[in-house]
Amino acid sequence: MALARSGAYLAGDRRVRPRERTRWRFILERLVEEAERALAGDDLSAGAEATELLLDLAQEIRG
């Protein structure tokens, strides 16, 4: 999460391998799907927490 917050996946940061940077979009999509499934299931608190983390990350990246 720290690398994502620092923008390492978006810029040419050496802490993230090029292949991992390419896969970041797919990883993010998977995390969103998992959060949606958690919200649709019985464990609303886990889904809400995951969704909140993703929204915070999106807000930080946007800024």
Image: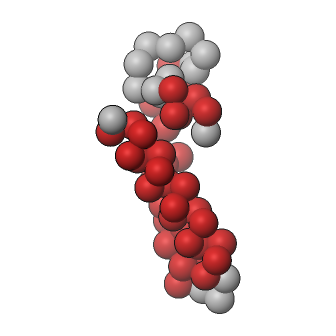
Relative to residue 3, is residue 62 depicted above or below? below
* Residue nearer the viewer, 12 or 59: 59
Whether residue 30 is visible, yes or no, is no
Q: Could you say where residue 51 lies in the image, as x and y percent from the top left? A: 51, 64
Quadrant of the image for the C terminus? top left
Question: Which of the 4 image quarters holds residue 48?
Answer: bottom right
- Outermost residue to the left: 62
Residue visible at 54% across and 79% down in the picture: 39
Relative to residue 7, is residue 24 depicted above or below? below
Q: Could you say where residue 54 lies in the image, as x and y percent from the top left? A: 49, 54
Question: Which of the 4 image quarters holds residue 2?
Answer: top right
Question: Which of the 4 image quarters holds residue 14?
Answer: top right
Residue visible at 55% across and 55% down in the picture: 53
Residue visible at 65% across and 88% down in the picture: 42
Whether residue 36 is visible, yes or no, is yes
Q: Could you say where residue 8 lies in the image, as x and y percent from the top left? A: 50, 23
* Residue nearer the viewer, 40 or 6: 6
User: Colour scheme in the image?
Assistant: secondary structure
- Outermost residue to the bottom: 42
Residue visible at 51% across and 61% down in the picture: 52
Quadrant of the image for the N terminus? top right
Relative to residue 13, is residue 59 depicted above or below? below
* Residue nearer the viewer, 58 or 11: 58
Left or right of 8 in this view: 47 = right
Q: How many marks?
A: 0
Q: Could you say where residue 9 lies in the image, as x and y percent from the top left? A: 48, 27
